Image (cartoon, helix red, strand yellow):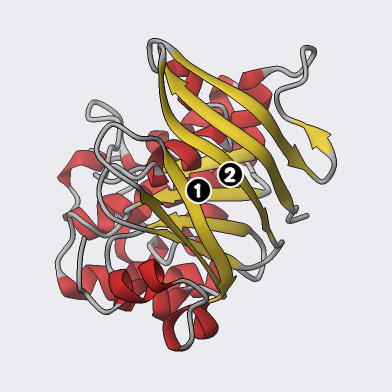
Amino acid sequence: MAKRIDVADLDAYYGTFKAVEGVTMTVEPRSVTALIGPSGCGKSTVLRTLNRMHEVTPGGRVEGRVLLDDQDLYAPDMDPVAVRRTIGMVFQRPNPFPTMTIFDNVVAGLKLNGIKDKARLNESAEQSLKGANLWEEVKDRLDKPGAGLSGGQQQRLCIARAIAVRPQVLLMDEPCSALDPISTLAIEDLINELKAEYTIVIVTHNMQQAARVSERTAFFNLAAAGEPGRLVEIDDTTTMFNNPGQRATEDYISGRFG
């Protein structure tokens, strides 16, 4: 079941440096929300706070609240590992486990969760690879190294690995930035299919991509170097691109800066 995310008064720090300040926004279930803005404005930091990956960074800490269907992900009794199972992540560069086969890459998370039943692993691998639109390309070489796939295939393998543990939310940090145009189109088509089942948040520098894949867009900016990034506005993507509420948003989307 896809879930809603509510972020309230979120500040994110690296040691004493406040990277992001005062973010409040809602991510609707079964939809794609794009985070856009110039480099250094905190988009990826905000993304990583949503599944508690930010605190893995030395000095990384958060103030404020992140709720998943009203459940506080930063509550004292909340297990960060459980949070990351519920909220999966796909990174900028494809990162299949280099020594593992395609099959073992997909089911790595399931095995980590203690699932050993071969039939269940086989079924999950097939379903996940089909969900990532990769099954037909790899079904006859599941025992081959995942690192031997093309860049676009590796990224879809990483998406298959993320959805194998049945998360409710998928976070994607510039998932197409290292890919060629054809592979990028394949990932965008996949995102459009996956949103029927998952809540998706994607960070992208590509304005056209944000316009193509997202229902809502959030624009982040920073007033000056060394200042924390802030959420300028969030709205329906069509509104953001055609009639943004803030001049800074219009200037960024039209290419005047960033």
Give me the residue at 34% from left, 73% from top: 209
Q: Secondary structure at mark 2?
A: strand
* Image quarter (top left, top right, bottom left or bottom right) of the N terminus: bottom right
State how far apart marks 1 and 2 are (Cα).
17 Å
Against 22, residue 235 (above or below) is: below
- Which residue appears at 82% of the width and 46% of the height? 69
Disc 2 packing (10 Å; few <14; some 14–19; many ≥20): many
Task: Say which label, 1 or 2, has the lower sequence index.
Answer: 2
| In the image: residue 35, left or right of residue 170 | left
Front residue of 10/147: it is 10
Q: Amino acid at mark 1?
A: Leu
Residue 115 seen by the camera: no
Which residue is found at the position 52% from the left and 55% from the top? 201
Query: Picture coordinates of residue 167 (x, y %)?
Result: 64, 44
Q: Residue at x 55, y 50 (%)?
A: 170
Q: Which residue is mark 1?
A: 171
Left/right placement of residue 142 relative to residue 133 reads left
Q: Position of residue 44 (x, y in %)?
A: 39, 42
Q: Which residue is mark 2?
A: 23
Q: Is residue 24 above or below residue 77?
A: below
Q: In this image, 168 relative to 98: left or right?
A: right
Numbered label attached to residue 75? none
State the image coordinates of residue 109 (x, y, percent, origin top left). 53, 30
Residue sticking out furthest to the right: 70
